[in-house]
Image: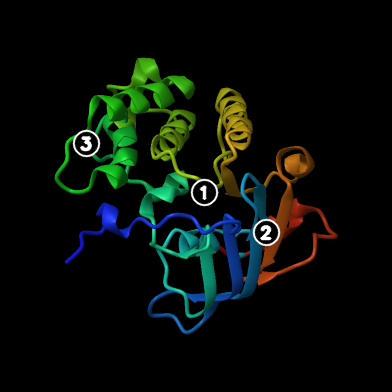
Amino acid sequence: MMLPYSNRRHLDPVADALALEVRDLNVEYPGSRRLALHHVNLRAPRGARVALVGANGAGKSTLLKAVAGLLPVSHGTIAIYGNPVGACHHRVAYLPQRGEIDWRFPIVLRRLVLTGRYVHLGWFRRPSRKDEAIVEAVIDQLGLTALMNRQIGQLSGGQQQRALLARALAQEADLLLFDEPLNAVDATTRAIISQVLTALQHQDKTVVTATHDLGRLDSDFDSVLYLEEGCEAPPPVRPFAEMTLGAAR
């Protein structure tokens, strides 16, 4: 039996393959007969910055979770650097929405960020000096050094969001999936995260981000996938605020 994080399951990228290719994807949540995604397609070249846009409940989070391997696919395919989902765990990092985390869990910020290295370690290896150095570097990059020994529930909302981003960066993944990283954060956190996203592009990392911020689509992203009720949709013709207020989660 191979352990989930065994190096034997890590496959090399297929030459010239896209970072992410989603074809005719259908996804439904376990126990539900209603499709959460209907025949969705997405192509993301290496180094691309792709925005997922849509009202709450449109399917943005569902798509990210399917690519991350957290939801089963009922129809269609997902290829990550030419390989199926799960073929190389360390190559994909997923940053969930802050509300999905139990911030009461008794762990300090530094230990939370260190969990981003576990996919490289497997079940039985202890973090090396290299792992510790990577963790300290990303914590510093996100402006959290002074808070690294603070219990995660004692952090502000913006600090918690940066901690989650630090955990994703510590994984050193090639494909990063961000679910609303700039939602309800302070100006300092917004500026830091924007700088990090720019730096990732310079490193030829591919980033797929669910976002409500339509004002920065042209400056921050190379392409946009609009979703509405789980389907691909054209750009909105009415103010996005109206779409959001009228949507069911």
Q: Is mark 3 on a helix, strand or loop?
A: loop
* Residue 220 in the image: above or below residue 191: below
Camera-nearest residue between 89 and 33: 89
Query: Can you name the residue that lies furthest to the top here?
Result: 146
Quarter holding the N terminus is: bottom left
Task: Report which quarter residue 156 is drawn in.
Answer: top left
Q: Which residue is drawn at 63% across and 48% down?
A: 211
Q: Which residue is drawn at 44% across and 58% down?
A: 68
Query: Can you name the residue that lies furthest to the bottom here?
Result: 33
| Residue occupied by mark 1 | 175
Q: Do the residues labelled 2 and 3 touch (CB within 8 Å)?
A: no
Between marks 2 and 3, how big is the CA–CA gap? 35 Å
Q: Which residue is drawn at 35% across and 28% down?
A: 135
| Residue occupied by mark 3 | 106
| Residue occupied by mark 2 | 54
Q: In the image, is 85 to the left or to the right of 243?
A: left
Q: Is mark 2 on a helix, strand or loop?
A: loop
Task: Report which quarter residue 147 is drawn in.
Answer: top left
**Rendered image: mark on residue 132:** none
Query: Can you name the residue that lies furthest to the right here?
Result: 237
For label 1, the crowd category at 10 Å Cα-Cα, with few meaning under 14, some 14 to 19 and many 20 or more, is: many
Q: Residue at x 57, y 38 (%)?
A: 184
Q: In the image, is 41 to the left or to the right of 34?
A: right
Query: What amino acid is found at the position of numbered circle 1 in the picture?
Result: Leu
Query: What amino acid is found at the position of numbered circle 3 in the picture?
Result: Pro
Query: What amino acid is found at the position of numbered circle 2 in the picture?
Result: Gly
Query: How far across and down, in percent of the image, does residue 99 sit?
Result: 43, 47
Sequence-earlier tag: 1 or 2: 2
